[in-house]
Image: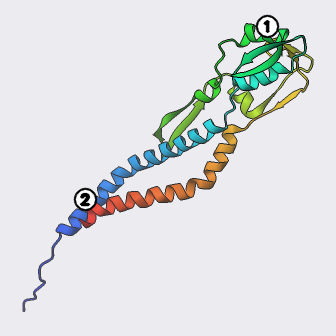
Amino acid sequence: MSEAWGSVEFGGLIELRDRLMQLQQDSDAFMQECADELCARLLAKVRKRTPVWNNKKLLSHLKNIKGTKLKVKATGVDSEFSERAMQIYGEHWAGHVGGHLRRSWQTIAARKVGDTFVAILENNVEYAMYVEHGHRQTPGRYVPALGVRLKANWVPGVHMLRISEDELRREIDAILQRKQEEWLRKMMKGVMS
């Protein structure tokens, strides 16, 4: 008695197996890409929130310094500043360009540590943590660059990084779901073709 089993095409299964193996290898690259994108999004958010001590804020502050007023053309507008304010500006602020703290944010590309991908956002400016978290100061101490005595004993933090992280946490599920769907569509397209 003979039985006929028929013929089976294994080519499609072999191709599927190979594609799934490729998918596993590509998953590390995908995870690294996701970590890098999230870090880049965090960078954009934190840069927007990082304060800049620019000339407009400085001139506004210098206007409040008491003394004999001089008429000065500054930032395209005629203004009056005291002689002391002009001296302070000349000694401490002439040529000042704001934004050093904001420009100093940088990312380090994601790398795999165990089963986790880690991307780093850093700012190596020495006073960055004081702007982020706040700091103590000594009331009554004279600050020559500002021409004033300090009044408060605590300067609150701006929390530009913490607020940005919290905002990104609320968006992360949607971002990763979209990226995962794109990636799976791309991977499965190769299997179906």
Camera-nearest residue between 17 and 188? 188
Label 1, label 2: how far apart the Cα atoms are: 74 Å
4 or 174: nearer the viewer: 174
70 displayed left or right of 73 = right
Left or right side of 150 for 23 = left
Helix, strand or loop at label 1? It is helix
Instruction: Find disc 1 in the rendering and name its residue.
Output: 87
Residue 83 x, y percent position in the rendering: 84, 8
Which of the 4 quarters of the picture holds residue 129? Answer: top right
Q: Point out the tag, 1 or 2, that comes first from the N-terminus.
A: 2
User: Which numbered marker is on residue 18?
Assistant: 2
In this view, the mark in front (1 or 2): 1
Q: Badge 2: few (under 14), some or many (20 or more) residues near its Cα, within 10 Å?
A: few
- Where residue 64 appears, as percent x and y from the top left, is 86, 21
Name the residue located 90 percent from the left edge and 12 percent from the top edge.
Answer: 67
Residue at the image point whose x is 74% and y is 36% from the top: 158
Residue shown at the point (92%, 17%) measured from the top left = 140
Residue in the foreground of this view, choosing between 104 and 120: 104
Residue 23 percent coordinates (x, y):
33, 56
Q: Which SS class for mark 2?
A: helix
- Quadrant where the C terminus is found in the figure: bottom left
Query: How would you rate the neighbour count of disc 1 (Cα within 10 Å): few for under 14, some for 14-19, many for 20 or more?
Result: some
Establish if 35 lies above or below 72: below
Q: Is residue 56 above or below residue 11?
A: above
The outermost residue toward the bottom is 1
Q: Mark 1–mark 2 contact, CB under 8 Å?
A: no
Callout 1, which amino acid? Gln
Task: Give x and y (percent) for residue 90.
Answer: 73, 8
Q: Report whether residue 114 is seen.
A: no
Q: Amino acid at mark 2?
A: Asp
Camera sees residue 35: yes
